[in-house]
Image: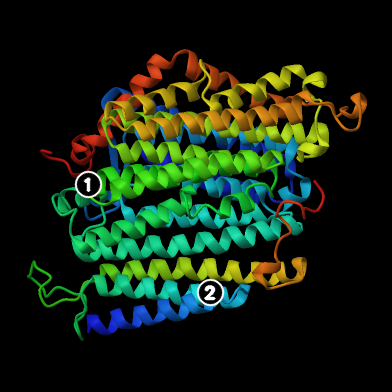
């Protein structure tokens, strides 16, 4: 099971990196989302995968034998929420910067580079 | 309980300034009150830590390592104190710097959210919690960078956001691997669990992820490109806040994680850190020399300074760590002073470009001296604080017979002196292209006071260096032997 998750994470990173190298803002963000999902999968697998077991300890027992680890799920949930917030901001930024800068191609974004500055 | 205040106060201030959205005056008042309250809390923590050693608090009463722990050792306490000092000066400076429009877009709430994240990152004893504080900091910094945005600001923000998000992903992946192999997230707990395991592949892999993540935050070579692309674009107050604190949080995280969690002694990370530190110093100094606009030069000088701090971490002796810590402390103040000073000169001369500014010395000699003090400190001229920081690092490098590193540190110091000399010549000494009467803008107390306070602090830090070097040596000792830290967090025998 872990090997499947590992392969999936690897695939997501490869696909994400490919998208990010396209040089445009939107594919870059989509690629980044894929990579951050790969990171989430890494945390998921780090808690060891157990199939079909609730994260509960039977009454009276003290060890987590036979229960799945709930902590990585809480961590991923946090990471997903944060990642979602960042993604929404980044999408809004990509949209606005297209209107302000007139391009989605990163090679053409040079308003803050030396020599091309507006004002100052 | 004391440890929660540096997080609660800025958070409350952010909420209150949001509620006072309609009145800029009220927002300013609350913002300043919040920054001053943060300073009081930071002073209380600092004095307690100096007296009794590290203190800790468990959130929600959950005992470590199960709950989230807040810890303040000397390094954390001093960083929180410096954060508060920077907060007060930047908030006061912002009154005459930030436009009303930017204030309407939420300058004050965002600033205090940023401070919440920074203080949280300094105080937390849990590595996943540190990730969360990094994100709080990151999202607030995105907002601050882009508000009031014109073309240059959007351009800078796109690059800043794009590159910082990669670092974020690397951070969380590293934490995931770390949890997978050690089964713990509390840094004091990890210290015990990873003892003697520093050669294992998974441990090294997670450390590599974290090095990439913190390196990106700290603007280490070769992942510093977001900094010169963005730091010169927002309001000067924002620039000062970022350059004083954001990269330093990355350095703090490195100092913390690579001494407490990982034992990097004898691993491949020592040569890697040394190479990265030297290249960071070199490219930072060369970048500073090649730019022709004030904040760009200062931006590259941040990168060079980061190189010095990481060099101290890489050498790794108590003296070297003390040097890194002292460099870190004084650089927070120096960068605040330089960027706020840059704001004043830009207002006086009407431009940041060297070609279009000049004549500040002739028109405003008093202010020029206030700018010169942090500039000389950055270059490492005695008696200012930067000299003692470099002295400690050079001494540490000599002690380990690292001649090349000694040479690199001294050469970078020389290049930085040259870069500051260029700034001085272009902005202060040379005549303004508009003639002698070009500089007429008045300087209010809200612009001069923060710059003056920082200049006095930098001078004081340099003149009574004995006290502060002793503090830095204590930090170095605490970092090399974290048993007091671990004992405070976990209780019981170390």
Q: Residue at x 48, y 22 (%)?
A: B387
Residue B87 in view here: yes
Q: Position of residue B178 (x, y in %)?
A: 26, 61
Which of the 4 quarters of the picture holds residue B378?
top right
Q: Residues within 10 Å of mark 1 (few under 14, many from 20)?
A: some
Q: Secondary structure at mark 2?
A: helix
Q: Residue B305 versus residue A37: which sits nearer the camera?
A: B305
Residue B419 disc label: none
Q: At x 51% / y 59%, what residue is drawn? A: B164
| Left or right of B332 in this view: B120 | left
Determine the CA span between mark 1 and mark 2.
Answer: 34 Å
Scheme by which the image is coloured: rainbow
Question: Looking at the picture, how far across and down is residue A107, in whole percent?
Answer: 67, 68
Q: Quadrant of the N terminus of chain B?
A: top left
Say which quarter of the image contains residue B409. Answer: top left
Look at mark 1 in the image and give the residue it sits on: B263
Q: Is residue B313 left or right of residue B344?
A: left
**Do the residues indicated by labels 1 and 2 lie within the same chain of the protein?**
no
Quadrant housing residue B25: top right
What chain is tagged by disc 2?
A
- In percent of width and height, residue A50 lies at 19, 81
Residue, disc 2: A20
Q: Quadrant of the C terminus of chain B?
A: top left
B345, above or below B225, in the image:
above
Above/below status of B217 relative to A8: above
- Asked whether B262 or B99 is in front, the reply is B262
Query: Looking at this view, is B463 or A50 the one in front?
Result: B463
Question: Is B162 or B78 nearer to us in this picture?
Answer: B162
Q: Give how far across and how far down residue A39 sits, in percent.
A: 37, 71
Disc 1: host chain: B
Dot 2 alpha-carbon crowd within 10 angstroms: few under 14, some 14 to 19, many 20 or more: many
> Dot 1 lies on which element?
loop
């Amino acid at each position: 099971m872990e090997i499947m998750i590992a392969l999936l994470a690897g695939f997501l990173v490869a696909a994400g990196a490919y998208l990010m190298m396209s040089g445009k803002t939107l594919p870059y963000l989509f690629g980044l989302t894929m990579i951050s999902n790969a990171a989430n999968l890494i945390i998921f697998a780090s808690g060891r995968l157990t199939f079909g077991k609730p994260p509960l300890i039977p009454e009276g027992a003290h060890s987590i034998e036979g229960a799945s680890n709930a902590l990585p799920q809480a961590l991923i949930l946090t990471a997903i929420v944060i990642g979602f917030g960042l993604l929404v901001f980044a999408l809004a930024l990509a949209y606005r910067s297209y209107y302000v800068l007139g391009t989605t191609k990163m090679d053409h974004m040079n308003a803050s580079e030396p020599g091309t500055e507006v004002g100052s | 309980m004391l440890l929660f205040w540096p997080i609660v106060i800025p958070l409350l201030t952010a909420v209150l300034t949001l509620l006072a959205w309609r009145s800029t005056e009220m927002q300013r008042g609350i913002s300043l009150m919040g920054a001053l309250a943060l300073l009081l809390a930071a002073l209380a923590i600092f004095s307690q830590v100096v007296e009794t050693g590290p203190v800790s608090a468990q959130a929600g009463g959950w005992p470590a390592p199960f709950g989230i722990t807040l810890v303040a050792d000397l390094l954390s306490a001093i960083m929180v104190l410096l954060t508060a000092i920077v907060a007060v000066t930047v908030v006061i400076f912002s009154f005459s710097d930030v436009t009303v429009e930017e204030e309407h877009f939420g300058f004050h709430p965002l600033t205090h959210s940023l401070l919440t994240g920074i203080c949280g990152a300094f105080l937390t004893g849990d590595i996943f919690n540190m990730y969360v504080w990094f994100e709080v900091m990151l999202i607030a910094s995105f907002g601050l960078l882009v508000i009031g945005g014109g073309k240059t600001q959007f351009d800078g923000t796109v690059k800043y956001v794009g590159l910082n998000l990669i670092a974020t992903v690397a951070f969380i992946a590293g934490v995931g691997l770390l949890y997978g192999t050690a089964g713990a997230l509390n840094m004091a707990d990890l210290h015990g669990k990873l003892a003697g395991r520093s050669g294992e592949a998974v441990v090294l892999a997670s450390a590599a992820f974290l090095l990439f993540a913190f390196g990106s935050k700290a603007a280490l070579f070769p992942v510093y490109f977001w900094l010169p692309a963005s730091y010169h674009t927002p309001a000067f107050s924002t620039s000062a806040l970022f350059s004083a604190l954001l990269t330093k949080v990355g350095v703090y995280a490195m100092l913390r994680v690579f001494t407490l969690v990982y034992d990097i002694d004898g691993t491949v990370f020592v040569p890697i850190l040394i190479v990265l530190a030297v290249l960071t110093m070199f490219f930072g100094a060369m970048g500073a020399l090649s730019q022709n606009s004030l904040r760009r030069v200062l931006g590259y000088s941040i990168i060079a300074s980061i190189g010095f701090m990481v060099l101290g971490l890489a050498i790794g002796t108590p003296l070297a760590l003390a040097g890194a810590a002292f460099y870190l402390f004084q650089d927070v103040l120096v960068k605040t002073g330089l960027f706020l000073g840059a704001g004043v000169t830009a207002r006086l001369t009407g431009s940041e470009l060297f070609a279009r500014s000049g004549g500040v010395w002739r028109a405003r000699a008093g202010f020029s001296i206030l700018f010169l003090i942090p500039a000389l400190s950055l270059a490492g001229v005695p008696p200012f604080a930067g000299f003692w920081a470099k002295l400690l690092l050079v001494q540490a490098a000599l002690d380990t017979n690292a001649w090349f590193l000694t040479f690199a540190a001294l050469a970078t110091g020389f290049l930085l002196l040259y870069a500051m000399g260029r700034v001085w010549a272009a902005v202060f000494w040379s005549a303004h292209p508009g003639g002698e009467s070009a500089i007429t803008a008045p300087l209010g107390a809200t612009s001069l006071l923060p710059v003056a306070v920082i200049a006095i602090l930098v001078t004081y830090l340099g003149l009574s260096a004995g006290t502060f070097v002793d503090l830095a040596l204590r930090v170095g000792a605490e970092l090399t032997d974290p048993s007091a830290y671990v004992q405070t967090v976990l209780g019981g025998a170390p």
